[in-house]
Image (cartoon, grey):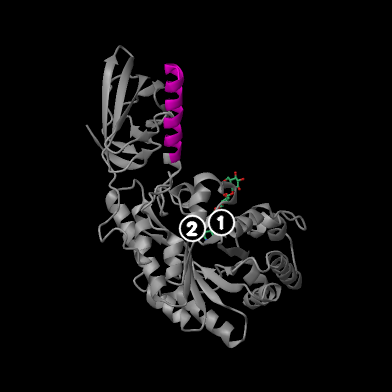
């Protein structure tokens, strides 16, 4: 082989290896959550976005989890955006993905106050018309997936925080009986699907949880088909309710199954090692609570990767709520789940890779209104960073004009430098440098604080 051809082959091979490396969600020694859960008689599930089910996202979803919940695709506004016009494409995609990966499907959700189509919410219906619309919707959707859905969230979020019924269009028009009617319609459409009520902030004991408890008790007493209660588990770092296991158990004692259906544990950004360690403990605590309750059928995380989570869109400055980071690397939380499911593969050692970074910022040239700067980012953690964004704030009005070896964007004083693709990976202990020209006036004070992918770095 001629030298330049050999060189090209080597470069291609290296690029291929790098791509493979990027696509590898976790190392071979890492546990498989679905196997661990099955050994405990549970499932471990994830919510997904149907359009993302390819590449690494699909590999992790189908490899690590044995239950799947469409995050939005089975909601009323998704499946019937205009009256009588159905769009099942997203829902069908999730169901067929589940079938080809041997996963259960949690259907989510039939009767909710949110994500309803405009034609439904803006119509002026009599109570009878609305009840028929609701039961027809259930019959159509549950019927379509008959035999393919293991659990349905039939009614979602029926309560206010104080335990009174939410004043949704369902409750205000139909009264409490809409819940029993919805459950009966679902049972008729698929007698084998397990029918759930689902809500948030019912994870521990309290007024809202008591209201759900009393509702389930009365539905059971009235012979209404109710099989389970879902506890969404949208939690805040360090605030797993201490009564969670007791709470799950008291519902189980009513004669229904229970499940954690939408687990995520959000934190104020930036991410730190201490927060990740707390999050690991929190995920472990929730999963352990389910393991300890025999009627707890499983846990579903509401998105498995921080790149696919509703939290940053809704809670300002918060995020990093799921068990995998934005680059599909397992976080300590993932190992916390595995440990709660009995994994001891780490020999009792904490397998959590350490993270850390150090940034050196230097002005290498400066003239009357302009300057050139160089930034070196060192990965001081124990695992590679795949894809990076370095951010800082300029203290005295500097403005970046052109950059090399990074894509730099600036909004006001906030600057973000993203990798240029070819330098996306920073190995453990490795570093990467980029540079840029900028304008200054008055003073050209260097920024004092930097983050790498949201985590604070030391500045040198
Ligand atoms: O699809 C549109 C897109 O076309 C548009 O460009 C974009 C602009 O914002 O919006 C997209 O729709 C978003 C939709 O998610 C799909 O991504 C909506 O704005 C957004 O509001 C919607 O958020 C969903 C949220 O429910 C709505 O309440 C989240 O993805 C979904 O994770 C979340 O899930 C709920 C559970 O169903 C019930 N429990 C609480 C949980 C979190 O809110």
In the image: residue 124, left or right of residue 31: right
Which residue is the site of mark 2? 302
Magenta residues, start to end = 1-20
Q: Quadrant of the N terminus?
A: top left
**Disc 2 element:** loop
For label 2, the crowd category at 10 Å Cα-Cα, with few meaning under 14, some 14 to 19 and many 20 or more, is many
Numbered badge on residue 146: none
Q: Is mark 2 within 8 Å of ligand 1?
A: yes
Determine contact: label 1, label 2, CB under 8 Å. yes
User: x, y percentage for residue 225?
Assistant: 62, 80
Q: Residue at x 52, y 74 (%)?
A: 229
Q: Residue furthest top?
A: 368
**The magenta stretch spans residue 10:** yes
Eyeballing the image, is 348 above or below 379?
below
User: x, y percentage for residue 404?
Assistant: 39, 21
Q: Residue at x 56, y 77 (%)?
A: 227
Which residue is the site of mark 1? 71
Q: Main secondary structure of the magenta part?
A: helix
Q: Is mark 1 within 8 Å of ligand 1?
A: yes
Eyeballing the image, is 200 above or below 319?
below
Task: Report which quarter residue 140 is drawn in.
Answer: bottom right
Task: Report which quarter residue 172 is drawn in.
Answer: bottom right
**The magenta stretch spans residue 96:** no
Q: Please tell me how many numbered marks the rendered image carries.
A: 2
Task: Report which quarter residue 135 is drawn in.
Answer: bottom right
Q: Residue at x 31, y 21 (%)?
A: 373
Query: Viewer-proximal residue, 206 or 220?
Result: 220
């Amino acid at each position: 082989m001629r030298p330049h051809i050999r060189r090209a082959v080597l470069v291609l091979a290296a690029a291929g290896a790098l791509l493979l490396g990027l696509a590898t969600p976790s190392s071979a020694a890492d546990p498989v959550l679905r196997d661990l859960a099955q050994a405990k008689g549970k499932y471990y599930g994830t919510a997904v976005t149907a359009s993302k089910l390819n590449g690494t996202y699909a590999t992790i979803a189908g490899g690590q989890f044995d239950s799947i919940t469409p995050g939005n695709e089975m909601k009323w506004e998704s499946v019937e955006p205009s009256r009588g016009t159905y769009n099942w494409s997203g829902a069908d995609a999730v169901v067929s993905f589940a079938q080809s990966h041997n996963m259960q499907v949690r259907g989510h959700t039939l009767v909710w106050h949110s994500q309803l189509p405009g034609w439904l919410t803006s119509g002026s219906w009599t109570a009878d018309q609305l009840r028929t619309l609701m039961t027809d919707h259930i019959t159509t959707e549950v019927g379509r997936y008959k035999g393919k859905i293991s659990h349905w969230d039939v009614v979602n979020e029926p309560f206010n925080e104080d335990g009174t019924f939410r004043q949704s269009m369902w409750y205000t028009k139909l009264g409490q009986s809409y819940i029993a009617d919805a459950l009966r319609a679902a049972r008729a459409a698929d007698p084998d699907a397990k029918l759930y009520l689902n809500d948030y902030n019912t994870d521990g004991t309290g007024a809202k949880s008591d209201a759900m408890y009393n509702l389930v008790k009365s539905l059971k007493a009235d012979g209404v088909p109710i099989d389970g209660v879902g506890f969404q588990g949208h939690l805040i770092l360090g605030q797993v309710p201490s009564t969670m296991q007791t709470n799950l158990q008291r519902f189980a004692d009513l004669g229904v199954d229970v499940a954690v259906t939408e687990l995520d544990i959000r934190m104020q950004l930036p991410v730190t090692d201490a927060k990740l360690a707390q999050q690991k403990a929190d995920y472990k605590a929730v999963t352990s609570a389910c393991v300890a309750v025999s009627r707890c059928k499983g846990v579903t995380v509401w998105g498995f990767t921080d790149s696919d989570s509703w939290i940053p869109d809704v809670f300002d400055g918060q995020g990093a709520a799921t068990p995998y980071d934005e680059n599909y690397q397992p976080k300590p939380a993932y190992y916390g789940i595995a440990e709660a499911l009995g994994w001891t593969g780490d020999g009792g050692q904490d397998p959590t890779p350490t993270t850390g970074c150090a940034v050196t910022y230097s002005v290498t040239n400066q003239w009357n209104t302009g300057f050139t700067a160089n930034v070196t980012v060192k990965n001081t953690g124990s695992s590679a960073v795949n894809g990076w964004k370095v951010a800082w704030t300029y203290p005295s009005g500097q403005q970046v004009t052109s950059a090399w070896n990074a894509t730099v964007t600036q909004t006001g004083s906030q600057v973000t430098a993203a990798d240029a693709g070819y330098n996306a990976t920073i190995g453990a202990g490795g570093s990467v440098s980029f540079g840029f020209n900028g304008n200054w006036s008055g003073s050209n004070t260097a920024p004092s604080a930097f983050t790498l992918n949201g985590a604070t770095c030391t500045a040198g």
